[in-house]
Amino acid sequence: MNKKPAKEIILDIIKEKSKAKKEVYNKTFEGFKNLKNELKIFVNEINKNLDKFDKDLLLKYNDRGDFEAEIKIAGDILIFNMHTNVFEFDDEHGVWKISYVRDNKLNSYCGIINIYNFLSDSFKYNRLDDVGYLIGRIFINKENHFFVEGKRQLGFLYNDFTNGIFNKQNIKKVIESTVLYTLDFDLLVPPYKAVNIASVMQIKENINNAKLATGKRLGFQFYNDSEKIE
């Protein structure tokens, strides 16, 4: 049995795998542009109903460049970030149980859009030690199929990788689910032991704005995606 020369193997990989990864990147980038557009539409639609109610509660959209966008919702900021690389899943990931992936390994290569939840005051007061949480990540492949790993509804409403298409209709649904989760994810009083020591420097800097890290679940265990947050 003749073994292929290394040069031919290299060419085959470039023609197949590298081409597939390029297609994944293009689909993810296109999807992220559509996501940003739907975020703007969502903010405008919500604000129409809030404008006469309380202007202080108006949502804000901020485009932070080709790969990042954010919306401010009351006391929260949601940051949507597209990673510029293409990823493969490890052997233990559940995606390999799907025939759509098993039958064509190239379908497993995905781009990622991460969704982070921060407190808006963390940015307003430049509290650099505050923490945010990855509440969801969107995986998109070369055929524009997608699924979401995330908290609560984000993790089980959008898990049909075989049939789910990252179109405007589904993008809108993902945004709505993300916002609903965020509004229900409240800031808890941290355990006493987590905040019972403060330095002189922290007090001098003003205890509310000092480097006393704040986060919605600081000092509590933040459960895995498949588990309910108490």
Image (cartoon, helix red, strand yellow):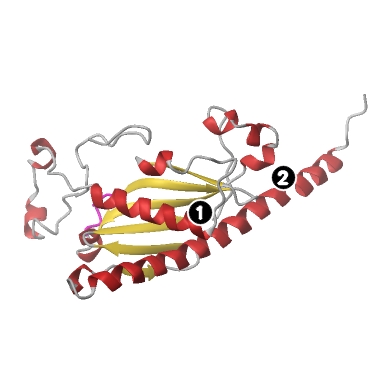
Principal secondary structure, stretch drawn in magenta: loop
Q: Is residue 76 magenta?
A: no
The answer to which image quadrant residue 38 occupies is: bottom left
Percent across and percent down for residue 195 are 11, 42
Quarter where residue 173 is shown:
bottom left
**In the image, residue 128 lies in the stretch drawn in magenta:** yes
Residue at the disc numbered 2: 17
The amino acid on which the numbered mark 2 sits, given as a three-letter code, is Lys
Look at 19% across and 50% down and name the residue there. 214
Which is nearer the eye, 140 or 52?
52
How far, Cα to Cα, is label 1 from label 2? 19 Å
What residue lies at 37% left-to-right and 55% top-to-bottom?
176
Taking 196 as reference, is 83 above or below it?
Answer: below
Residue 67 seen in render? no
Q: State the image coordinates of residue 43 (x, y, percent, origin top left).
A: 35, 68
Compared across the picture, whether 38 is left or right of 77 comes to right
Checking the image for residue 56, the label placed there is none
- Residue 131 position within the rendered picture, expressed as x and y whole percent measured from the top left: 27, 49
